[in-house]
Image (cartoon, rainbow, N blue to C red):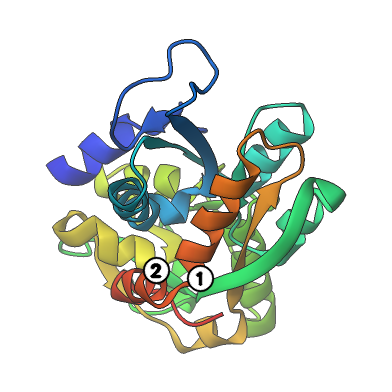
Amino acid sequence: MKRLALALSALALVAPLAACGGSEDSGGGDSADSTTLTVFAAASLTATFTELGHEFEADHDGTTVRLSFGGSSDLVEQIRSGAPADVVASADTATMDKLGDDAVDPEDFASNTLEIAVPPGNPAHVTSLADLAGPGVKLVICAPEVPCGTATAVVAQKAGVTLQPVSQEQSVTDVLGKVSSGEADAGVVYVTDVKAAGDDVEGVTFPESSSVVNTYPIATVKGSRNADAAREFVDFVLSDDGQKMLAGAGFGKP
């Protein structure tokens, strides 16, 4: 649980910008021999994009990748409100579509499905999607405007299961935090989130999850001051090496 707690402490609802490595850009601009690339990415991409960021920096001298993670809908709203970003990666296409022309040539790079996360030992004995609707089960899910929340609602509707969560969170990391701390008996997140959490939670698969597959798009952001580097980062995510990293984290092909 310590590992997840440390990760979550670095991620608020929308995590502050954090550099993968290299020197900080204290002046807010890039010097002639350095570039700071700002990447907004869905919370479920935290571990994988952190690794991708380090690899990109290693192959691009003078480039610092600054990552901001959070619920896709929050990230999109920040960009629409003028927050500076060079690259954006969301957890579904519908959320990316809200950026309109601000998202330059979005491309699908991964897919993901849902899984139930429970605290170690599974004290509520959750073994199925239907169990989440059982009496006394403290369930936490993502809010409906967040991609994982939209997927959860669709899966439950298709399965004929009425969910009554005790709370609805703005990102999968918030859901995981409540499950790993024991505040919730179960939470619905992505397969990749359960894998990344390690021993902090246990995963319960359910066949109904295959009815909804989230496709993840990535795009450069219109008006980026580092358009060339942003395009290179997108290409890296789409490359064979980038795809291997994503597959290793449990993501599927787009």
Is 48 positioned to the left or the right of 103 in the image?
A: left
Q: Tell me if residue 87 comes above or below residue 238 in the rendering.
A: above
Q: Which mark is residue 254?
A: none
| Farthest-out residue, front | 32
The crowd level at tag 1 (other Cα within 10 Å; few <14, some 14-19, many 20+) is some
Which residue matches tag 2?
242
Q: How many marks?
A: 2
Is 177 positioned to the left or the right of 29 in the image?
A: left
For the point 55% across and 59% down, the residue is 234
> At numbered mark 2, what does the secondary structure look like: helix, strand or loop?
helix
Residue 86 at x, y percent in the picture: 61, 40
Is 102 positioned to the left or the right of 108 in the image?
A: right
Residue 161 at x, y percent in the picture: 61, 75
Q: Tell me if residue 128 comes above or below residue 190 in the rendering.
A: below
> At numbered mark 1, what does the secondary structure look like: helix, strand or loop?
helix
For the point 49% across and 25% down, the residue is 32
Which quarter of the figure has residue 226? Answer: top right
Task: Give the amino acid type for the residue marked by disc 2 in the picture.
Answer: Gly
Of 114 and 38, nearer the camera is: 38
Could you give the CA–CA distance between mark 2 and mark 1, rounded to whole angstroms?
6 Å
* Residue 59 seen in render: yes
Task: Give the amino acid type for the residue marked by disc 1 in the picture.
Answer: Leu
Q: Tell me if residue 65 comes above or below residue 83 in the rendering.
A: below
For the point 36% across and 55% down, the residue is 52
If the image is split into quadrants, where does the C terminus sit?
bottom right
Which residue matches tag 1?
238
Q: Are marks 2 and 1 in contact (CB under 8 Å)?
A: yes
* Residue 139 seen in render: no
Which quarter of the figure has residue 3? Answer: top left
